[in-house]
Every structure is written in C-alpha cells, then in structure tokens.
Image (cartoon, rainbow, N blue to C red):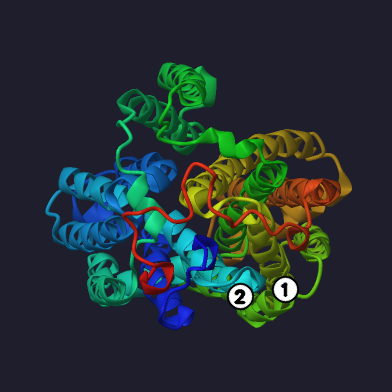
Amino acid sequence: MTKADVRPSVNPWIVTIAVMLATFMEVLDTTVVNVSIPHISGNLSATYEEGTWVVTSYLVANAIVLPMAGWLANYFGRRKMLLACVAGFSIASFLCGAATSLEQLIIFRVLQGLAGGGLQPLAQAILFESFPKEKHGQAMAAYALGIIVAPIVGPTLGGWITDNYTWRWIFYLNIPVGAFSLMMMARYIHDPPYIKRLRDATVDLWGIALLAIGLGSLQILLDTGQRKDWLGSRDIRIEAFCCVAGLIAFVIREFTVDHPIVDLRALKDRSFAVGVFLMSAVGFCLYASMVLLPQYLETLLNYPSMQAGLALSPRGLGSLGLTFIVGAIAARVDVRKLLVAGFAVGATTMFMFSHLNLNAGYWDIFWPQVLQGGAMSCVFIPLSAAAMSHISREKMGNATSIFNLMRNIGGSVGIAMMTTLLARRQQFHQNRLVEHILPGRTHVYSSLQQFTGYFISRGSDPITASRQAYTAIFGQLQQQAAMLSFVEAFKIMAVVFLALIPLVALLKDPKKNHGATRPSAAIPAHAPDEAPAELIHM
C-alpha cells in the first residue's frame, strides 16, 4: 500500500467533525465582533474608531499566520500544530472576554488571530487526505458549510448575544466548543508519515519577517484606507509602500531560498493557479456583498442591527440546502460545469440585488439570497476540488494555506473597494441630483408645500417648517443617491461573476489525473524508519 492510499482508521466523518468545529469557531470570530463594536467601545471607554482595532488586529494577525500554516505543520507536526492552535484560540478567547481595557483586548485579539490562522488551511488539508479522491466533493461540502455559513451567522449571533447578555459572552462561548474540539482532535487526528520527514528544514526568518510586513501593512491599509482618504493620508502612503516593498521582497525570497516558509512554486500548476485566482475573485464578491447588504438594510430601510442580521440568514439556508447535494454529485460530473452554473447564478443574484429600491420588502431580499447561497455551494466545493486535484499530499498543507489566504485577501479587497465606491458614487449622484432640485420647478414646489404643511401641523412656525421641509427633501435626495450607488456596486459584482466563467476552461478535469496524490519523488515510498502504511493513522 502506498502513502497515497493511507486513510484514517476511524470514520472520516468523525475526523470532519473534529476539525470543522474549530474551523467554524474561528471563521465565526472574524465577523461576530463587528456588530458589537459600539458596545465594546462604550464599555471600555474608547471611541468607535479605536474600537475597530478589535477587528483589525485579529485580521492582521490571522493573515500573517495563514500562509505559513502548511510549513508550520510540516515543521512541528500537524497534530501538534492543530492542538496548539485550538488550545491557544480558546485561551485567547477567555482572555478577550476578561479584558478590562481596550489595549488588553487588542493584545488578546492578536493572540487569538495568531492561534486561529492555521485552522482553516490545516482543516482543509486534513479533509482532503481523510477522504478518497472520489469523495473530495463531500469533504469540501463539509468545509464549505463552515466557510459560507459562519460569516452569515456571525453578525446575527453577535447582535443577539450583545443585546441580551454582554459582548464578553461572544468570546466565552468559544471555550466549550474549543475544549470539545480539542478532545476530538487529540483522539482522532494523527500525523501522516511524510510530515515526519520535513522537520530538518531551516527556518526562513527573513521570509517570516517580510510576510508579516507585507500582509500586515496590506490588511491595515485595506481596513483603514477609506476612513483616512486613501493616498491622501500620509499613514496610508507609508503602509502602501511597506506593503508593496514587503510583498515583492517576500516573493523574490521565497523563489530563491531552499526551504521557503510559503512554497509559491505550487502556483506553477495551472489548475491551482487558476483556482487561486478564481477563489480570490469569489471572495471579492461574496464578502463585499455580505457587508453591503446589511448596510443597505440598516441605512436605507431602517432595519435594526438584529433584524438586519436575521435578513442575511436565507443565504445560509441556500447553502445548507445544496452543499451536500453538490458534494455528492461532484464525483459524478465534470466539476467545471458546476462552476459555470455557480458563477452564472451568482451573477443573476447580483443583478437581482441591483434592482432593489427604497420600497423593497423582505421577500425581495429573501429569494436572491437563497439562490446566492446555493450558487456559492456550486462554486466553493468544485473549485476547491479542481484546484487541489493536482497537488501532491506532502504539499497539500502549503497549497491550502495559499488558497485560503487569497480568499481572505480577495474578501478584504472587495470590502475596501466596494465601500469606497459607495462613498464616492453617493457623493457623485448627490451632486447630480441637487442640480434638479430647483425651487421654481413644479414638482419641487409641490413637495416643499406638502412638507411645510406637514411640519406646521406638527406645531412648527412657518419659517421653521420651511427649513424643515428643505431638510426633509435633501434627506430624500441623499437616500436616492445612496440607493443609486448600491445599484452600481451590485452590478459591478455581477459583471465580475460573469467574467469568471471563461476562466473555468483553464482548469483541468480532476478525474483525468490520478498522479497528483502519489508521494513526491523526493520522499521514498518505503522509508526504512517508517512503520507499515497499514498501521499509520493520519
């Protein structure tokens, strides 16, 4: 029996539960805090601007560790790495909940991000290895549930906990989940044999430093750029320089060093490189839409935060309804057809969102989200399977690290670009609409008279009522300008989805290649210091 055939002696679904509990917990924590920032800031005597660092600090730390996860697992051992990540994440969660100042909370959130950064890629790599190749679709179905559903559940759960209890319970709830996941992993997760042969590599300290500078600066730039007017701010220009210089130096370093901290040579595989690009674009649209939609609901339709979070839940219903169906049929059909269908439906839902208006009802928002959730199931599962199908097992951890990193970066870029677009286009449309608000025009005069009469009936004197009428009309104008900017943003994301469809042809058919899971030539199939493959648990 070859290493490619090594399977865990336990049911792979038990392994799935063990790794996905922790992964779901980690992905949930990237969004669950967002709606609680005002409460956290007020409780810790900080401004809202300072409170946003509770989110930014976590994302920066997470982004730095994420691409290194594969190397760290190979160096220390995957099982030890996973146990350390879950234990560290749980302990950091307790410390976050017990923080007595904003400074303490930010420090503990950095620790939480560092611990959680390795969970996503290692979980994905373990699932690929736990299931035979023909069942990779089912493995990715389980993985997609955590990646798609957790960001949707996060805002609703965070809002409910904060409103009914205290923001500290957002972090305390991670402790029992982490403890259970830790026990499951300690019992059922074991290192595959090839990882034991990769621990003699020297540590690429320069690579780690350059990666931290490049990705850390990028994440801070994307998170604070709009608030600081992008390159109009000296701080943003410094961060942009550090980002570009750090990432260029990092790429050069990783292609020239013998033992890179992130092996970028994996991108030489065409399917993997195309898959990484497609996943980045999907992250761009998915995460941006998950920020824009609640903003539309809260600012234009006046939904409370809790109801806005609940209004996002249909996307999770769509994902749950199709995820395991897609996972089951992925082994029987060409996954590229599923991808085309997923991108086409994704574009359709974005066009549906672009037809929303200020009078939209709940069902106008419900059905596009259900369809989008199903579309994402048709994208995440086949795309993961197609991208990883030609990656050898001993390089799987490195590949999944890059894959997950680029999804997150795509999401950060999407959020930054779409929020900037909203602000800039809203100002543009506002200026254009103001040109049509002239007192001499009949419809403007009629509206002014109606509003003035309304405010007089509410007890205002004629002069004050007239001023209030102008304010009311200007408020309506601002709403219309904001609505137009939302329409444009959703149309842009629809076009991005459509533009991805031709690129699917560049992916190779996973079913036509059976050599990707064989051991690398550099690692003998029967090393003398290894136990027989039949006795080795993964």
Q: Secondary structure at mark 2?
A: helix
User: Can residue 459 be seen here?
Assistant: no
Q: For residue 8, which quarter of the picture?
A: bottom left
Compared across the picture, whether 410 is left or right of 113 comes to right
Amino acid at pointer 1: Ala
Name which of mark 2 and mark 1 comes first in the sequence. 2
Which mark identifies residue 311?
none
Question: For the C terminus, which image quadrant?
Answer: bottom left
- Provide the residue designation for mark 2: 138
Give percent across and percent down for residue 200: 30, 38
Residue at image point 39% right, 61% down? 192
Q: Is residue 289 above or below residue 342?
A: above
Identify which amino acid the numbered label 2 is placed on.
Gln
Q: Residue furthest front?
A: 528
In the image, 261: left or right of 443? left
Residue 129, horizontal then vertical, whole percent: 50, 65
Please state which of residues 47 and 343 is positioned toward the viewer in this rendering: 343
Count all numbered tags in the image, as a single digit.
2
Vertical arrangement, residue 145 with respect to residue 504, above or below: below
Residue picked out by circle 1: 331
Q: Position of residue 92 (x, y in %)?
A: 20, 57
Name the front one of labels 2 and 1: 1
